Amino acid sequence: MRTKLAPLALGVLVICVAAACGGSGGGSSTTTAAATSTATTPAQQKAAIERVWTAFFSSKTSPQQRAMYLQNGAKFEQAIREQSKSPLAQQVSSTVKSVTLQGPADAKVVYSIDLAGKPALKNQTGTAVKVNGLWQVGDDSFCKLLGLGGKVPAGCKNVG
């Protein structure tokens, strides 16, 4: 069964990641990102990371906002914008399974990529980083997902 799902999952992944898993509709505001700077306890830090991660992969978040939720997002904004027009991307979201703080500015995130509310790629591992007091999706996670599809933007060439 796993081999039957692999091509579908990879197809969803390519479309999802290239579009940063969302449509072009507005919705999410800077409130989510701003709230991350006030998180001080480990539980608040984890909740802030989950909010940013979920917003980054949400079809309700604009491409401009998604770029703000991504480490070095300005490098990827054009790719996010161009690919956000995919109809399939509007059905994609993510579910955060766990967040493990690994220092004051780094965290491990275990998540799934969902299609129409159902897991398409389960138990993916990514990173979150704190930049200027705000938690963001690690660009290495974004590039890793893009790499699974075989095509990565130029901004991924120097990512770790």
Image (spheres, helix red, strand yellow):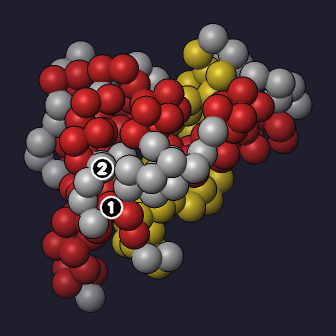
Image quarter (top left, top right, bottom left or bottom right) of the C terminus: top left
Kindly indicate whether the residue at mark 1 contacts the one at mark 2 (C-beta within 8 angstroms): yes
Instruction: Tell me where residue 11 appears, x and y as whole percent.
Output: 19, 66
Q: Is residue 149 left or right of residue 101?
A: left
Q: Between disc 2 and disc 1, whose residue precedes?
A: 2
Q: Could you classify mark 1 by the number of other residues whose Cα lies within 10 Å: few (under 14), some (14-19), or many (20 or more)?
A: many
Instruction: Tell me where residue 147 appears, x and y as whole percent.
Output: 20, 42
Under circle 2, the secondary element is: loop
Instruction: Give the residue pinned by disc 2.
Output: 84
Q: Is residue 95 visible?
A: yes
Residue at 22% from the left image edge and 64% from the top image edge: 10
Instruction: Tell me where residue 95 appears, x and y as whole percent.
Output: 56, 61
Residue at 30% from the left image edge and 20% from the top image edge: 75
The residues tagged by marks 2 and 1 sit, at their Cα atoms, a distance apart of 7 Å
Mark 1 residue type: Ala
- Name the mark on residue 89: 1
